[in-house]
Amino acid sequence: MRVILQRSKQASVTVDGQVTGAIQKGYVLLVGITHSDTEEDIAYVAKKITDLRIWEDEDGKMNRSIAEAGGDILSISQFTLYADTRKGKRPSFVEAARPEQAKPLWEAFNEQLKANGLHVETGIFGAMMDVALINDGPVTITIESKGK
């Protein structure tokens, strides 16, 4: 599992002209699932995101979690995170899980974040989405379950 986390001041996702998810302060999560991912990967990454301390405390140091900072989550499925560009001019996506495997794992990931006490908004799995955000910092972090 691979997640690109962007700390944001506000963000939204729109599908066919309709906003499907929007947050103010929080994280935009671009979520990629590979064919070998399991519930263990989901739990690991959800806990890592929940506990990650990248919000400033009163001294201006990154020392607060998203819950302590009062932030929310905007979770967006993104199979292109597993693009392989080593050969040719067109990326290969063979490392991305098939939709029938990826969608339930992405949904389980979102449910795990909710179970961890976070408010989660989402895009629509498999849809063409317009994502808008104001990156805060900017702070952008990659989290992977492999090699944990």
Image: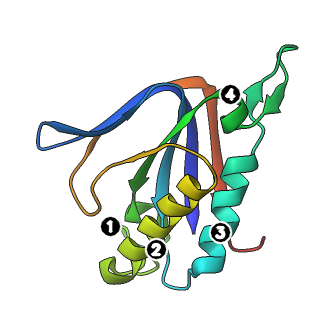
Quarter containing the C terminus: bottom right
Q: Which mark is residue 69?
A: 4
C-beta proximity under 8 Å, tags 2 and 3: no
Name the residue rendered at 57%, 45% in the picture.
118
Tag 2 residue: 105
Say which label, 1 or 2, has the lower sequence index. 1
**Residue lying farthest to the right in this orientation:** 59
Query: Which disc is residue 90 wearing?
Result: 1
Report if the CB atoms under discs 1 and 3 are less than 8 Å apart: no
Numbered mark located on residue 31 in the image: none
Query: Counting other residues with Cα less than 10 Å from the Cα at mark 2, is it few (<14), some (14-19), or many (20 or more)?
Result: many
Q: Residue placed at 67% from the left, 37% from the top?
A: 67
Mark before the other along the chain sequence, 2 or 3: 3
Q: CA distance from mark 2 to mark 3?
A: 10 Å
Query: Residue 5 sits in which quadrant?
Result: top right
Earlier in the chain: of badge 3 and badge 4, it is 3
Q: Picture coordinates of residue 104 (x, y %)? A: 40, 75
Verify CB contact (< 8 Å) between mark 4 and mark 2: no
Left or right: 120 in relation to 16: right
Q: Outermost residue toward the left?
A: 16
Q: Is residue 134 above or below residue 110?
A: above
Q: Position of residue 8 (x, y in %)?
A: 53, 28
* Circle nearer the viewer, 1 or 2: 2
- For badge 2, the amino acid type reads Leu
- Look at label 1 and name its amino acid: Arg
46 over 43 or under it: above or below: above
Q: Nearer the viewer, mark 1 or mark 3?
A: 3
Label located before the other in sequence (1 or 4): 4
Q: Residues within 10 Å of mark 1 (few under 14, many from 20)?
A: few
- Residue drawn at (48%, 64%), measured in percent from left and top? 32
Name the residue tied to disc 3: 43
Q: Position of residue 117 (x, y in %)?
A: 61, 48
